[in-house]
Image: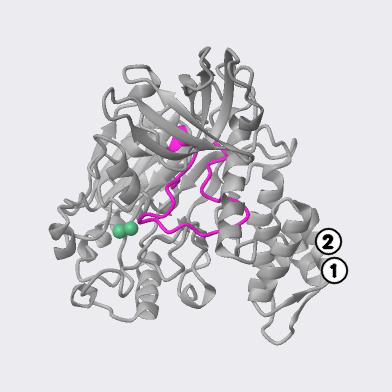
Amino acid sequence: MASSLREHLVAYFQQHQKLVEAGALELLLDHTHPLVVSREVIERSDAVSPFVTREMVETVLAEGRTSISGARASVARPSDPRAPPAGAPILPFRLIQDGFSGPPIGDTPLLAYSALFHSRFRTLSRLLKGRPGLENLRPIKELRAPDGTASVIGLVRDVRETPQKHHLIVTVDDEGDSLEVLVPKGSPGGRLTFLPDEVVGLRLEFGKDARRLPRVAAVERPDIPVTRTVGRARVASRALFLSDLHLGSRSFLSDNWGHLADFLHGRGPAGELAAAIQYVVVAGDLVDGIGIYPRQEKDLAIADVVEQYAELGRRLRELPERLTIVVIPGNHDAVCPAEPQPALPTNLTTRLGPNVKILSNPSTFALDGVVVSAYHGRSFDDLIPAIPGASYSRPTEVMKRMLQMRHLAPIYGDRTPLAPSGRDGLVLDTAPDILVTGHSHTYGVDRYRGVLLLNASTWQAETEYQRMRNIIPVPARAALVDLATFGVQTMNFLDGDPSVSEVAA
Ligand SMILES: [Fe+2]
Ligand SMILES: [Fe+2]
């Protein structure tokens, strides 16, 4: 494992035309978040020298941006990643996990994806091991039928239905073997949908006849623990959640954005609500991009992607400077579309102010001690068709399923491209207090096992392309969350001054 991380880091620096010295590498390998630090080293290194020295890493660590010191703090007590070390002050903003995990490990795509799925399996297995519902847990190759009852953890490879009785036959893989199991129609497991590439725990019953498939008696998903400590701000603090700005689109709701800026400056009848807002989180599709869908040019007011980001900078600077603004990219942004997506590159972010935190998609961070996972939501395009009854108009139902799987985009080989890397950055290994998504251009607030689920609307009016795809947007909404009480208010900026409605707890 250590050697693969070493190779991974060397490859990462090579990709940036840098050679990493042994001393620098040792220091990085000792750090709890070597990739976060490596990215910082690259961002700060000058273009002339081909070397990454120990001193360069030491400088980055010593100057310690909040994100790095925070990353270190977040793993100081692995049982509770939200907690900083004893005695440390609670930082207003603290990065916990950068979803982007660098270039692939392995020389071939097959090896690279194999490393990704091993990482997914191991991380999610850790969450399932020791569950009372999974007694006699064994690797698949150690199962001996007939054997009474045993449990396995597996990654779902295939699901099919028997032609006559409509039972399910599910094929699962662990790291050493694969297994076919029978999920009887009408059983508790038979009412569930098994999604490709999700990790599940299965309690199995074996009959006397060794030729028959083991039957699934119970299914355990990684899920959010029923009892856990939830994070709440200890100071008066509010965060406003937005998504899908689509700057550069002709359909960008410029006037409504102006109303939002006015509100945040405390103007208008709802203005007093703005005073306690410290944070604005934007869940991707910051700009409309170019060449994202057929004949997009005719929908663009700004046809140059660099100019689109300059306009993003201008519109974000209309908001008060005191705000910390957190942005992640989405599938319209100018970064690699494979997920996890890296943060926007520095050449596109020069016009964003110093109060803007530019993170990867997904990212997990804490705002005044409240853990937020932000994910743009491209995987809705795969999960909605795969889950019976799911729809773009009710995105939070799909988000509940993400929490049950503790994975944001499990399905490989469909519309969400997955980046092959040695760590699956789409696993939710820290249970968040808030999960925010966008992408569906709708709006939703819900709660699941203490986690607040937000789908944060859009600032783009309906486009012809959406009309064609039957997507009805719910634009110009923002979710205002009191981080101390978790009360939520929906702000609707569609008609000038916002209308404010409380969302039931
Ligand atoms: Fe979007
Ligand atoms: Fe999107």
Q: Name the residue: 46% across, 62% down.
A: 338
**Which of 492 and 444 lies nearest the eye of the viewer?**
444
Q: Name the residue: 32% across, 20% down.
A: 185
For label 2, the SS is helix
What's the mark number on residue 22?
1
Q: Do the CB atoms of the residues marked 1 and 2 lie less than 8 Å apart?
A: yes
When the figure is inspected, residue 288 is found, relative to residue 472, above or below; the finding is: below
Residue 78 falls inside the magenta stretch: no
Residue 261 visible to the viewer: no
Q: Hey, what amino acid is under mark 2?
A: Glu
Residue 17 visible to the viewer: yes
78 on left or right of 308: right
**Which of 341 and 2 lies nearest the eye of the viewer?**
2
**Which of 130 and 440 lies nearest the eye of the viewer?**
130
| Rendering quarter of residue 36 | bottom right
Give the residues in magenta: 402-431
Residue 207 locus on image (x, y percent): 51, 13
Is the image coloured rainbow, by chain, by secondary structure, or in one colour? one colour
When the figure is inspected, residue 384 is found, relative to residue 80, above or below; the finding is: below
Q: Name the residue: 71% across, 78% down.
A: 18
Q: Where is the C terminus found, in terms of image quarters?
A: top left
Residue 14 locus on image (x, y percent): 68, 75
Badge 1 crowding class, 10 Å Cα cut-off, few under 14, some 14 to 19, many 20 or more, is few
Q: Hey, what amino acid is under mark 1?
A: Ala
What's the mark number on residue 26?
2
Per the model, the C-alpha gap separating discs 1 and 2 is 6 Å
Residue 193 locus on image (x, y percent): 36, 32
Residue 158 locus on image (x, y percent): 42, 40
